[in-house]
Amino acid sequence: MARGTGWSETLVELGEVKLHLARAGSGRPVVILHHDTGTPEQLDFYDTLARRFEVIVPHHPGYGRSERPQWLRSVRDIAVTYQWLLADLGADSASLIGLGFGGWIAAEMATMAPREFHRLVLVGAMGIKPPQGDILDQAIVSYLDYARAGFHDQQAFARIYGDVTTDQLVEWDLCREMSFRIAWKPYMYNPTLPHLLGGVRAPALVVWGDDDKIVPKSAGERYAALLPKARLVTVRAAGHCVEMEQPDELATLVSGFIGEN
Amino acid sequence: MFVMYFTEQPMSTYPADIGLEVGHTALMFSNKHFDPVAGSRLYNEYLEHYIYAEEQGVEGFMLNEHHNAPFCMQAKCNIFASILAAVTKKAKIVLLGNPLPLAENPVRLAEELSMIDMISKGRLVPGIVRGGGQESLAAGVNPAYNRERFQEAHDLIVAAWTRQGPFRWEGTHYQHRVVNPWAVPLQKPYPRIWVPGVLSQETIIWAAQQRYPYIALNTSIEATKKIWELYDKVALETGYEAGPENRGYLQQVHVSDSEEKAEKNARQFLWMQGEFTGLAHPVWSNPSGYFSPTLRRNFVEFAVGRAENPRGRPTFEQQVADGRVFFGTPKTVIPKLRRVLEETRPSIYGIWGNDGTVSNEDARTCIRLLGQEVMPAMREIGKELGLKDPFELNSPVHLRYSNDLKQMPQAAE
């Protein structure tokens, strides 16, 4: 249950996909696409944005409270599913905020429908092969170590996740299994995506934590170079999960950017 | 009663102290610790052990493979199988087995196995496995589709062996424009497939649905009985009554000419730190999607160090007590094996005779005593207990070749 004010939870059926959505606020529609570790039910970052925008947080198919579609076998399948969702919701000119793995989905969506989106925000986005370094392979680290690697400051991890319960570990395992099902090889990127980013019309903000241990910053630089109207901003004292470690700074950046006409 | 000899073929000269210090000996344990000079000697010794085993009366060779780990040097069981097919005469060559999900081209695997079957003049038992979790990582093959690939690769291999080519295969994980391997097996309808396993109920159920013998790998006597309960239940649901011909058992049994030496050498079964898959890293040995979903909570707790391995990690004494490790002279070991045969009634029996740093001389003594004394005694006990193996009974190679089904089975393939 999203505990900030005004959140509602719904289950949306899109063909065979049953999608869990959390929604709050009003104004311009903003879709937030979560990490490969799912999303906590409540985040200050979500609440802050919901004061100004209509915020929609879907649980990706096969993650969190959205059940796994057995047939779904690629990240593009998720991106297409979300185009369907936005059509059903009538959310025109939405902005996309993609966090990590969710950034890959957002980038795929933007390339599929170049004129559709108001703004594109990619935070520590996966999806392209970093020119230098590799995306951290969660297959060889434990659930806890992988989640912790998303943070610059382990106290921030503790604020969000507390003493990690077995239920949380089980959820991370389900998320990980789904990530393997759709992004095992190549791991967490699409080799053709860089060639398609040039078509995106929406202005893009590429944000990177200065201590991102999951996705090398070189990927951010490449995104910023390939997207026609993009700028790259680095957030200090933040790891991969910028929205959890520096929620106010990110919310300010993003609100200003999405608030532009 | 069919009895075969097995060794994991350990790379016993690797620095075990470094393995203990690092905390794991698979996947990421550096191959800088592999010594190819020792490797060359050991491969040849292990081959000579199998050849010697046949000379001593052993009727079956069991071979397996593992990857990126010192506890087993055999990286491709088809290679040893090919050599043994050419240089031995009578013993069955039992592969337990080829890890099907790791195959990118099952048709090629079908061809290789057909060649081995022909070269061996029909002595091949090409068993199949899912491969260990860390082997999915070593091979870069998706653990989340391990079981799907296992079943589809099986279906494709059997089709390649039994359907006249050319035909086309449009599967979920495998697509082949043309399936038409020139080499096909000598044994008809196809060589017997056996399925070994340790834990996953899904594999036991699948094996029973195919009517393939299930080989319990070094499980305790009590766990083995539970496996048969499940197998028998599924068999009945599928339309047949399972018997000893559906049951196999692999046990660690070291025999020697003295009790003291036998115990000393049997302790080498713990050389791989007492765990079946070596000193495994809890994350790598159980990648998400690989293990049985019913055990998800146990595995995630194990992966972060909150719980013991759901597969267990018993001490040597516990393993001796619950019947996983036997040692002694033939005189003391045979009565222990009789008890196992009486209690679990398998007709296929693998004896894992030597492991770790057991000397070449002691390994050969073990093989000689197994071949000359222990295995003949087991075959006699098997006769007395009515433990007829699939070869003696000429039991159906697969469910679909059954003519004794009590009801129409579900489509099993």
Image (cartoon, helix red, strand yellow):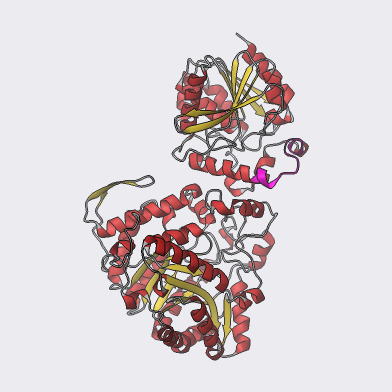
On-image quarter of the N terminus of chain B: bottom left
In magenta segment, residue A98? no
On-image quarter of the C terminus of chain B: bottom left
How many numbered discs? 0
User: Residue B85: percent from the left, percent from the top?
Assistant: 34, 73
Image: A186 above or below B116: above
Q: Is residue B161 left or right of residue A102?
A: left
Instruction: Give the magenta part as a residue range.
Output: A156-169
Q: Residue at x 58, y 41 (%)?
A: A175
Image: B390 above or below A26: below
User: Residue B262: percent from the left, percent from the top?
Assistant: 59, 84
Image: B13 above or below B307: below
Image quadrant of residue B157?
bottom left
In this view, the residue in front, B304 or B80, is B304
Image quadrant of residue A2?
top right
Q: Is residue B317 left or right of residue B144?
A: right
Q: Residue furthest top?
A: A261
Does residue B321 appear in this view?
Answer: yes
In magenta segment, residue A165? yes
User: Residue A156: percent from the left, percent from the top?
Assistant: 75, 35
In this view, the residue in front, B404 or B129, is B404
Image: A62 above or below B92: above
In this view, the residue in front, B324 or A125, is B324
Q: Main secondary structure of the magenta part?
A: helix
Does residue B41 appear in this view?
Answer: no
User: Residue A139: percent from the left, percent from the top?
Assistant: 57, 47
Q: Residue furthest right?
A: A155
Q: Is residue B314 left or right of residue B229?
A: right
Q: Residue at x 44, y 70 (%)?
A: B63
